[in-house]
Image (cartoon, rainbow, N blue to C red):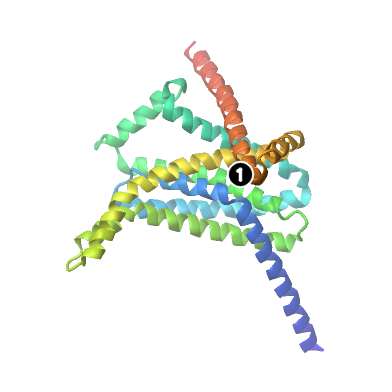
Amino acid sequence: MAGGSLLLLLDDISLIMDDVATMTKVAAKKTVGVLGDDLALNAEQVSGVKPSRELPVVWAVAKGSFVNKLILVPAALLISFFAPWLITPLLMVGGLFLSYEGAEKVVHKFWPRLLPDDEEHQARVAANADESVDLVAMEKQKVKGAIRTDFILSAEIVVISLGTMTAASLVDKSLALSVIAIAVTIGIYGLVGFIVKIDDIGLHMMQKPGASNTTQKIGQFLLSAAPKLMKVLTIVGTLAMFLVGGGIIVHGVNSLEHAVEDLADLTGVFEGLSANLLNGVIGFAIGLVVLLIVTLIKKARSGSAAH
């Protein structure tokens, strides 16, 4: 009898683990755009730090990310249990934020004078180049900023993941979200740590005593590829903001979702690609609108403060 009960328990556990694995895979597919954005943003956040401090900064941000998810996962589970209707509005808010942040990046790159905080940004750039600036304080500021950004993106990942588990039990949701939170944090910050040290790895391979020609060539390639990789990640991360943010907004508005599907149908075999592109265009357009509203509010506040 006891043996039969144990077998039943093991069978239940194996079924739960199977469900968790399936939900984790589905959630991972849904959050891949945000993960790319998260990776690009965090790699960018720690750039400009002294080489000897790069890994400690990445580790500090990673610890902050674990704390963020320790707060977010239980909060998300409580929302799904007591107020599941909140999931879609929260996703929409996250989509608006991602679209806004992407639009801000694009405008800051090509038309920086249009943003009211451009002078502040230039002052930070000048401070980074000034050796007399307190580097410890600057490093702490970078870490705080990166953790703040991580909190927003982590919230988006958790909510998107939760949106794929609406029919699951609370136990399954808890396990799946915990697996995703741990895997995402280790994966993202492990990659960020590797990316920021690629140039050092390449230099070490080139300068290693007795290194073969092949090793030196690989080292040279890594050294030259590091800054290009950072640029690619920045571009990919920005595009991901529009694709993910626009996709969330489109899925949250039924009429808009149907319109996108109808337009995508016209392209035939490229239906999936067309839908994603349309999501990206909508994300960019909405991001510009939100950016305009935020910019006008900031200008109004600065004008009233001056008086």
Task: Quarter of the image for the N terminus: give it.
Answer: bottom right
Q: Residue at x 25, y 59 (%)?
A: 217
Residue 275, image quadrant: top right
Q: Which residue is mark 1?
A: 273
Q: Residue furthest right?
A: 1
SS at badge 1: helix
Q: Residue at x 75, y 83 (%)?
A: 7
Vertically, is 6 above or below 242?
Answer: below
Q: Nearer the viewer, residue 13 or 243?
A: 243
In the picture provided, is 200 more to the left or to the right than 75? left
How many marks do you count on the picture?
A: 1
Q: Residue furthest top?
A: 307
Q: Nearer the viewer, residue 261 or 81?
A: 261
Q: Residues within 10 Å of mark 1 (few under 14, many from 20)?
A: few
Asked whether the viewer can see residue 301, the reply is: yes
Q: Residue at x 52, y 56 (%)?
A: 185
Asked whether the viewer can see residue 144, the reply is: no
Q: Residue 149: percent from the left, percent from the top?
A: 51, 42
Q: Residue 132: percent from the left, percent from the top?
A: 24, 36
Vertically, is 173 above or below 90?
Answer: below
Q: Residue 157: percent from the left, percent from the top?
A: 60, 49
Q: Residue at x 46, y 55 (%)?
A: 189
Amino acid type, mark 1? Leu
